[in-house]
Image (spheres, helix red, strand yellow):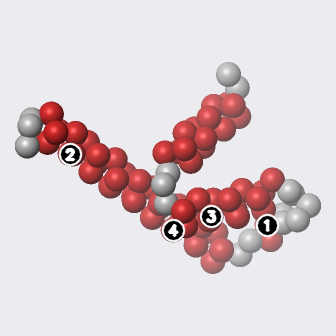
Amino acid sequence: MTNIEIIKQKIINLVMAMDNEQALEVLHDVIGKFSNPSSVAEDELTDEEWDEIENDMKEIEEEESKRQEEVVEHLKQWKSGK
């Protein structure tokens, strides 16, 4: 598997684990811009836009981590019979 294929699979796995509609819409918009290089070049984004994308991605990752932790805790409680 090439590095590109590995990265694609990682992205697919992250997206498939997400249930946040707003986060998915943000990702869709960003990916859409980069899938058509003639529509938006990477250097056309301002520093503020890049900061916003980075902040949104951090928030999405934190929310997903929190949900995973909640699931783990729920499973622990369920297994212990509580």
Q: Can residue 52 be seen in this view?
A: yes
Q: Which amino acid does the dot numbered 3 rest on?
A: Glu
Helix, strand or loop at label 1? It is helix
Q: Residue 82 carries which label?
A: none
Q: What residue type is labelled 4?
A: Asn
Q: Nearer the viewer, mark 4 or mark 3?
A: 3
Residue that carries the numbered disc 1 in the rendered image: 43
Residue 6 screen position, x and y as percent: 63, 31
Cα distance in 3D space between marks 4 and 1? 19 Å
**Would you name the residue on which mark 3 appears?**
25
Which badge, 4 or 3, comes first in the chain's sequence?
A: 3
Quarter of the rendering occupied by the C terminus? top left
Please give the count of numbered marks on the rendered protein: 4
43 and 4: which one is in front?
4
The answer to whether marks 1 and 3 mark residues whose Cβ atoms lie closer than 8 Å is no
Q: Is mark 2 on a helix, strand or loop?
A: helix
Q: What residue type is labelled 1?
A: Asp
Mark 2 vs 1, N-terminal side: 1
Residue 63, given in percent of the width and then of the height, sits at 39, 59
Nearer to the camera, 47 or 20? 20
- Give the class, few, some or many, for how many residues have Cα within 10 Å of label 3's Cα (few <14, many ≥20): few
Question: In the rendered structure, are the residues bearing label 2 and label 4 in contact, judged by CB atoms less than 8 Å apart?
Answer: no
Disc 3 is placed on an element classified as helix
Residue that mark 2 sits on: 73
Give whichever of discs 4 and 1 has the lower sequence position: 1
Query: What's the distance in space between the residues labelled 2 and 3, CA to CA?
Result: 28 Å
